[in-house]
């Protein structure tokens, strides 16, 4: 998809906008003064796909915590600032890689300009983070609510202050908890400015609704080429936010696959195993190995290997056995209780040796044994759509018999 061209800024070592890979952000939930606890969470977020982490800077203890956290962090740190512009100055002194300012609650022009001048001197970018829930009351009243035009005007007003002091190292968000309004706000903003955009549905809530809202809002905009960095705001362990953000980008083809992509059939009456149990076990085992492959777990051999033929590797159940396949070709048939172990073993070899080598190493007779199982199952259970039976019934109607 064609991406909207935006100005590029750098949050520490991470480029944002201007064709850079779309980055994933998350935010810690610890008290910032708890340096070790916060750093542990930052490391967990980085390990699960976060490129940038935001940390609240809500008092002096937090600012002092940042001074210790920033030099030890594996990823750039953004300080989240509300109400007190002096905490933005303190966060800059602590060495943060970016600031997030909320125009709804830091309103004094002179305060904003003071922060911008200091950030400019230090080469630190600022996110203008407009939030429908904390919009400037004057603007909200004028528009009669937190409508897209109001959110964008709030952002433009703040950008005006920053540009007045020649500060253009800016990214912007206009978050709303209502998905259609969030999408409309970002579309309007994207038409209006060339600064990079940080996408998010604010206060999306717990799983699964929060995840669905975020995917609907962020995914819609990314598919239109809008957005340079994203955050899922979930009422959940922030590691889930980082994972979800990363996965969304991978599924949309906007970032290279870094880890496992497990696909599994939804299961049905034809399933020969408990697909949920096997898929869960396989996911746990494969995620622990961090193998960058697509793996399929299919409940039956009748449709499984064919439907999942695009997966790098997969397993389908049938007649007490597991049929292990690579790119749709059966390479081994193993007892059902060994399915997950065999899948893990073959997945490791596939990553080490490649598809051609593993297809060449297929067990003699595996494909034939698998086909025999498939034919037998078809005989026992009938084909998926009971085609022969349905055709016969149609013929009977035509015959009038
Ligand atoms: S692969 Fe087999 S068990 Fe799974 S949904 Fe398809 S027909 Fe049902």
Image: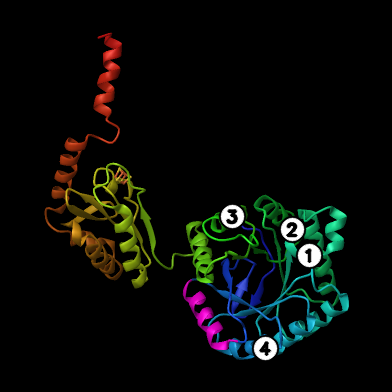
Q: Position of residue 131 (x, y in %)?
A: 73, 64
Q: CA distance from mark 4 to mark 1?
A: 29 Å
Q: How is the image coloured?
A: rainbow
Which residue extends farthest top? 400
Name which of mark 2 and mark 3 comes first in the sequence.
2
Q: CA distance from mark 3 to mark 4?
A: 34 Å
Dot 2 and dot 1 residues touching (CB under 8 Å): yes
Q: Ligand 1 within 8 A of label 2's CB?
A: no
Region in magenta: 34-48
Residue at image mark 2: 189
Q: Position of residue 245 (x, y in %)?
A: 53, 64
Q: Quadrant of residue 388?
A: top left
Q: Ligand 1 within 8 A of label 3's CB?
A: no
Q: CA distance from mark 2 to mark 3?
A: 20 Å
Name which of mark 3 and mark 1 comes first in the sequence.
1
Dot 4 and dot 1 residues touching (CB under 8 Å): no
Q: CA distance from mark 2 to mark 1?
A: 9 Å
From the viewer's perspective, is residue 197 above or below residue 112?
above
* 108 or 163: nearer the viewer: 108
């Amino acid at each position: 998809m064609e991406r909207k061209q935006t100005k590029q800024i750098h949050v520490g070592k991470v480029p944002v906008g201007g064709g850079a890979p779309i980055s994933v952000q998350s935010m810690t939930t610890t008290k910032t003064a708890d340096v070790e606890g916060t750093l542990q969470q930052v490391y967990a977020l980085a390990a699960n796909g976060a490129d940038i982490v935001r940390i609240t800077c809500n008092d002096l203890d937090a600012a002092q915590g940042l001074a210790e956290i920033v030099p030890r962090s594996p990823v750039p740190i953004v300080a989240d600032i509300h109400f007190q512009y002096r905490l933005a100055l303190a966060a800059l002194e602590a060495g943060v890689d970016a600031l997030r300012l909320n125009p709804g609650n830091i309103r004094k022009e002179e305060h904003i300009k003071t922060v911008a001048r200091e950030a400019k001197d230090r080469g630190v970018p600022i996110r203008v983070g407009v939030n429908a829930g904390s919009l400037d009351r004057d603007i909200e009243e004028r528009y009669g609510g937190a409508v897209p035009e109001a959110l964008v005007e709030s952002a433009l007003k703040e950008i005006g202050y920053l540009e007045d002091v020649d500060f253009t190292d800016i990214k912007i968000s206009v978050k709303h908890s209502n998905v259609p309004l969030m999408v409309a706000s970002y579309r309007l903003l994207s038409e209006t400015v060339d600064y990079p955009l940080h996408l998010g549905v604010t206060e999306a809530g717990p799983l699964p609704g929060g995840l669905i809202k975020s995917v609907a809002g962020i995914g819609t905009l990314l598919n239109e080429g809008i957005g340079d960095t994203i955050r899922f705001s979930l009422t959940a362990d922030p590691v889930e936010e980082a994972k979800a953000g990363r996965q969304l980008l991978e599924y949309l083809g906007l970032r290279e696959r870094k880890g496992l992509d497990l696909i599994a059939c939804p299961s049905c009456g034809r399933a020969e195993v408990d697909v949920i149990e096997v898929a869960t076990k396989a996911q746990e085992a494969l995620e622990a190995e961090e193998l960058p492959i697509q793996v399929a777990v299919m409940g039956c051999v009748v449709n499984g290997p064919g439907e999942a033929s695009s997966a790098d590797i997969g397993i389908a159940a049938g007649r007490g056995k597991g049929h292990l396949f690579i790119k749709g070709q059966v390479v081994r048939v193993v007892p059902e209780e060994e399915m997950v172990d065999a899948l893990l073993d073959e997945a490791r070899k596939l990553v080490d040796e490649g598809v051609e080598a593993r297809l060449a190493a297929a067990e003699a007779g595996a494909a034939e044994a698998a086909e025999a199982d498939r034919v037998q199952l078809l005989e026992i259970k009938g084909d998926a759509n009971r085609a022969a039976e349905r055709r016969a019934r149609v013929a009977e109607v035509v015959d009038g018999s």
